[in-house]
Image (cartoon, rainbow, N blue to C red):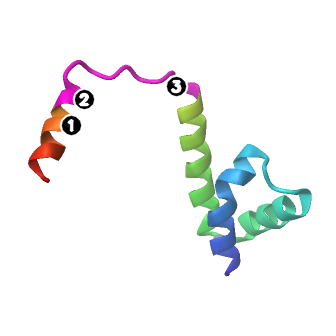
Amino acid sequence: MTPCEKLRARGSDLIDGDCDEETAAKLNAHLDECPDCNPWFSSLQSTVGLLRNLPSPPIPDGLLEHIRQVTTRNK
Ligand SMILES: [Zn+2]
């Protein structure tokens, strides 16, 4: 596994604080030096932050019924 793959596999753990200290230090060090992973991680972080701050959106009337019809039709 390349350091990039490792970071992408553990990115959400790093945000959640689910990595052990050594792993977190390695991932953070990689973030500092990798021009690809840095923006990737920033966008992951903001996505996770947004999702956590949003209340569950209400499901619009008729949406479930619409999904059911579409999925049934395609079977
Ligand atoms: Zn990388």
- The boundaries of the magenta stretch are 53-65
Asked if residue 7 lies left or right of residue 71, the reply is right
Q: Which residue sits at x=54%, y=34%?
A: 50
Front residue of 65 and 56: 65
Residue at 58% across / 41% down in the picture?
Answer: 48
- Ligand 1 lies in which image quarter? bottom right
Q: What whole-number distance in Å separates the C-alpha atoms at marks 2 and 3?
A: 21 Å
Give yes or no for contact between labels 2 and 1 (Cβ–Cβ under 8 Å).
Answer: yes
Is label 1 in a helix, a strand or a loop? helix
Q: Amino acid at mark 3?
A: Leu
- Residue at mark 3: 54
Residue under label 1, please give it: 67
Q: Check disc 1: other Cα within 10 Å, few if <14, some if 14-19, many if 20+.
A: few
Magenta segment: does it hold 1? no
Above or below, 16 relative to 24: above
Amino acid type for the residue under numbered disc 2: Leu
Quarter placement of the N terminus? bottom right
- Residue 14 placed where, x, y %? 74, 53
Which comes before the other along the chain, label 1 or label 3?
A: 3
Identify which residue, 74 or 51, lies in the foreground: 74
Q: Nearer the viewer, mark 1 or mark 3?
A: 1
* Circle nearer the viewer, 2 or 3: 2
Residue depicted at 14% across the width and 44% down the height: 72
Residue 19 bears which disc, if any?
A: none
Q: Residue furthest bottom?
A: 1
Q: Indicate which disc, 2 or 3, sits on the residue closer to the N terminus.
A: 3
Question: Crowding near pointer 3: few (<14 within 10 Å), some, many (20+)?
Answer: few
Q: Looking at the magenta stretch, what is its main secondary structure?
A: loop
| Residue assigned mark 2 | 64
Q: Is residue 65 above or below residue 70?
A: above
